[in-house]
Image (cartoon, helix red, strand yellow):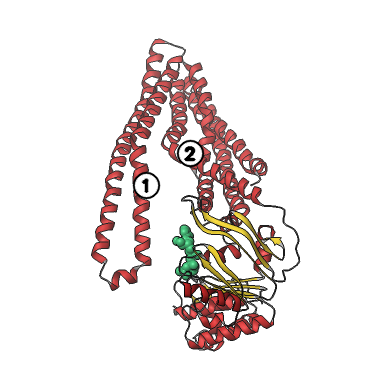
Amino acid sequence: MNKSFFFKHYILPTAFFSFIINMFLLAPSLFMFQMFDRVIGTRSKEALWLLSLLLLVALVVMAIIEVVRSRILVNANNAMDLMLAPYLLKKMVEGATSPEGNPNTYALKDLQTVRTFLTGQGIIQLLDAPWLPIYMILLYFMHPMMLLVLVIGTVLMVSLSIASEFLTKDPLAESNSANRLATRFVDSAMLNAEVVNAMGMQANLTKRWASLNDRVIILQTKASKWSGRISGMTKFVRQIVQSMSMAVGTYIMLGDATFSMGMIMAGGIIFGKALGPLEYVISGWRSILETRAAYARLDAFIKGANQAQPYLLELPPPTGQIAMEHVTFGIRATGKILIRDVSFSLVAGDSLGIVGPSASGKSTLARLLVGAWKPQQGVIRIDGADLANWPSERLGQHIGYLPQDIELFAGSIAENIARLDEPDSEMVIEAARIAGLHEMILQMQNGYDTQIGEGGTVLSGGQRQRIGFARAIYGNPKILILDEPNASLDTAGETALVNAMALLKEAGTTTIFITHNPHFINNVSKLLVMQNGALAAFGPKEWVMAQLNKATQQGQVSA
Ligand SMILES: Nc1ncnc2c1ncn2[C@@H]1O[C@H](COP(=O)(O)OP(=O)(O)OP(=O)(O)O)[C@@H](O)[C@H]1O
Ligand SMILES: [Mg+2]
């Protein structure tokens, strides 16, 4: 974020206009002062007209400036969103390169928090707050006792807010985390609605949710009881202070002939002006702190994202060579190693089958190969260059990846096959044909424009897998990685897949597939066996099969 640009173009003008507005805000008190002391004293109607006219002009100018100021803030909000939101989303997705939850998922939400503060009353009141000392000085010059009343009021209000913070902080934090838990529970219940309904788990589900929700309610009630009491007390104090300014003013006037009626009235107005922002800062303290924290997180995220950007070479399109050199990958938080020191290499056009028992690390290997997760040790090379040095957008065009759990996006079938790009009809149809999907799509009501996802057509597991496959081969990638591509395919689908693989092999695509199906193993030239996160065997298919058979006879390894 270009902070100085932002400061210069938005915050500074806002501060400037706030200054002018505050100057004009003194006009009503000056008016009162003049009115009582001059007009009433001299009984001059001309003076009254003139004063009223001046006040009117001042108020109109102030209203115009306020409109301008709020427009600047709206522009600031839009500019901030325009400059940052797409960048943040991109970095958030790019940064999600680890199986562990990453804190960056909140960057967009943090941006919204900061934006809301910037356009709302928050920043305006905050920019008005520095005027409190000026009002205090004015009151002091009227009479020290007036200032004393304001100071006492301020101290009382601040103490009340500290008490409120102290009393509600823990229950609020607890109720927020309890609420998150309850929300997550509902989300998972909705995702698993099928299972819940099929096995009659509704009653248990409700019971569990109710116990989570009860906790939220109890904690919230506790917090809001206190905050309600204290905000009532704060309002009371504010009103008392406001009225006391009149009482004290009158008291001073009784003993001091130079203290005029106008001063009492002007003083009352100044009290109101001083207490407004004060009350806001007190009541909005939490949102100010939250905004500050959101801003700090955002700043750190942007700095981190910029730093992580290495100098990326302009590399020619890859030919399809892949190598892993001593790659190790694990979960940092638990220290669990998922991939242990794996090395192998493929030349362009190779076809590799990866086999191994469940949880042996096959899918993890695939995620590392496509750069979705980053290895903690070792290097993955595409055409000799470290995967980390490839600009992901450019390399992505040359990679086809079909994950084990296919996720399609809300949009049309064509858009999904075209990887969310503007679909190129010829290429989409070619990919669909190769995937054995073309006829099936034509039979749908809207053909390639059929909407899928939320509110759209519900696709079968096999259809989804085929669309995922068509998306992977869209644009003839140089490297194709398929994780159990046949899991939900029927015989026709499998035949289409096998034919597609033969076509791609002819075209020189390097293909890797993870499978339990001996059908596919027959078509590969190389085989890699994973066992407990480590490479158990790698080499030409016949050789590895022979090794495997030998090992199975000895009862050591099972594929
Ligand atoms: N997101 C994750 N967070 C933590 N651990 C994970 C994650 N994904 C996988 N693992 C762990 O990594 C190990 C290997 O999982 P992986 O999915 O690579 O196995 P697989 O060989 O593909 O198995 P399958 O044949 O069942 O698909 C497992 O022990 C699994 O628990
Ligand atoms: Mg897997």
* Eye-nearest disc, 1 or 2: 1
In the image, residue 289 sits, relative to residue 40, either above or below, namely below
Camera-side residue of 4 and 518: 518
What residue lies at 54% left-to-right and 43% top-to-bottom?
295
Q: Which mark is residue 349?
A: none
Q: Amino acid at mark 2?
A: Ile
What residue lies at 75% left-to-right and 63% top-to-bottom?
315
Judge left or right: residue 365 versus residue 214. right
Q: Identify the residue position indicated by label 1 in the image.
A: 176
Secondary structure under badge 1?
helix
Q: Amino acid at mark 1?
A: Asn
Q: Identify the residue position indicated by label 2 in the image.
A: 288
Q: Horizontal and vertical percent for residue 433?
A: 59, 86
Q: Earlier in the sequence, mark 1 or mark 2?
A: 1
Q: Horizontal and vertical percent for residue 125?
A: 50, 37
Mark 1 touches mark 2? (CB < 8 Å): no
Judge left or right: residue 408 versus residue 390. left
Camera-side residue of 102 and 64: 102
Secondary structure under badge 2?
helix
- Mark 2: give few (<14), some (14-19) or many (20+) Cα within 10 Å: some
